[in-house]
Amino acid sequence: MSKFLGFSCSLCDREYGPNEIIYTCPKDGGNLDIVYNFSSLKQDVSSDMIINSPEESLWRYLPLLPVNQVHGRETPLQAAGWTPIFSPPALREQLGLQSLWVKDESRNPTASFKDRASAVVVARALEIGVEVVVTASTGNAGAALAGMAAAAGQKAVIFAPRTAPPAKIAQLLIYGAEVLLVDGNYDQAFDLSILAANEFGWYCRNTGYNPFTLEGKKTAALEIWECLINRRSFESPLAVFVSVGDGNIISGLHKGFKDLQALDWLAEMPRIFGVQAEGSAAVANAFSAGVEEISPVAAETLADSISVDLPRDGVRAVRAASQTGGAYLTVSDAEILAAIADLGRVGIFAEPAGAAAYAGLHKALKQAIIGSEDPVLVFNTGSGLKDVNAAMQAVAPAVIIEPTLRAVEQALDLSD
Ligand SMILES: *Cc1c(COP(=O)(O)O)cnc(C)c1O
Ligand SMILES: [Zn+2]
């Protein structure tokens, strides 16, 4: 019997067969969870099999993914996931935390967390034999899809807001995608991409719409389990901090940990903390109101990757915190810029959305939501090279000098 049984609606719990449906629940538009046959998985897969896998990518978790073979050997598809986990002493000291880890997703092939989702969606697209994949994106999801599709020899069409940072647009173009810059925001690009996908018969990767993105994103939770939780014993549950836009990454992390519990490989559920920009806080608003319904906002933040009016995976994103003893925090653009500088000083270059999680951790410590003995892992979800403009706002400008030794002395205050 196959491991991939089908889909289950996150709103009404209705179940669908694996070939019965493509995107969301036809009854209520709810996001779909992929359902596994855990009793057969428990017989066929052991944690040792995974831990001893030679794959240095997210494909080491193939037995726990809804596709059938490792995709993209000898291409960048092979390099998605399996990102490093650092524990910079200077950050631990700065925050006064005994145990702090940073999982650096900027090390993915297109330099953001989105590669995990796109690798699995492209694998699914290959298995169901579609020719064109499409996505709406603030930039990173598009870059990831364009890069992964290029690696797999697939055609990609990307809808991005025309205001997306130039580096992200450059990635789309360089990877050879059809790039449509929408004179509107991400939410408008999102709606248009679905209309176009339906009209032209393309396979749509959209975040919080295609159920396979979540499965790719859950692999980060599997890595945290394998590299951290499984190798030590924590006195209190690990607290995981991640930034939230559509809410698909945080929901994916939750799903990954839930799958591990269903396999009996994870004793204690980590606490999951979502961080949103103050100006784009629809999920955080719902969380603090104690509801799951998401009311749209008019998003305004320099962290473009988490600038979303209506988060498309908001319900599951609220649950990721509420069902694990986590919480939501909001941070200002100024706090995000300060976090970029803090991470930079230990050698980690984050884009604004990537650094937002660290800014949220800072706040959680100040508000005593996290204590100095709590073990914490914080994500950097994207590379600072994606948005150099924002990075330059986080630091003082470089000095320009005359080409003389005297000028060096003056600039560096070395003269006596
Ligand atoms: C997409 C993205 C996020 C947020 O992920 P969601 O699934 O939209 O919540 C955070 N950081 C970066 C760098 C991203 O590209
Ligand atoms: Zn439903």
Image (cartoon, rainbow, N blue to C red):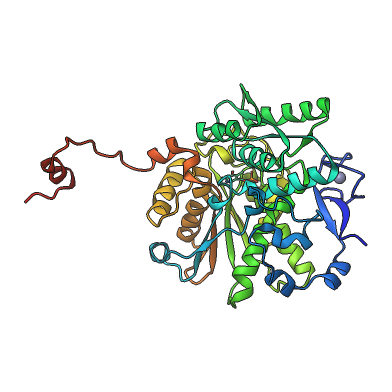
Residue 50 x, y percent position in the rendering: 72, 69
Where is residue 92 shown, x and y percent of the image?
A: 43, 65
Q: Can you name the residue that lies furthest to the front here?
A: 74
Whether residue 50 is visible: yes
Locate residue 89: give its quadrant. bottom left
Name the residue at the top extreme.
183
Is 275 or 294 nearer to us in this picture? 275
Residue 221 in the image, given as x and y percentages of width and height = 66, 61
The vertical placement of 123 against 195, above or below, is below
Question: Which of the image's four quarters has the N terminus?
Answer: bottom right
Q: Is residue 70 left or right of residue 14?
A: left
Image quarter for residue 307? top right
Q: Which residue is drawn at 52% across and 33% down?
A: 165
Q: Where is residue 119 in the image (x, y as percent from the top left)?
A: 70, 48
| Horizontal relation, residue 109 to residue 11: left or right | left
In the image, what residue occupies the spot 54% across and 52% down? 107
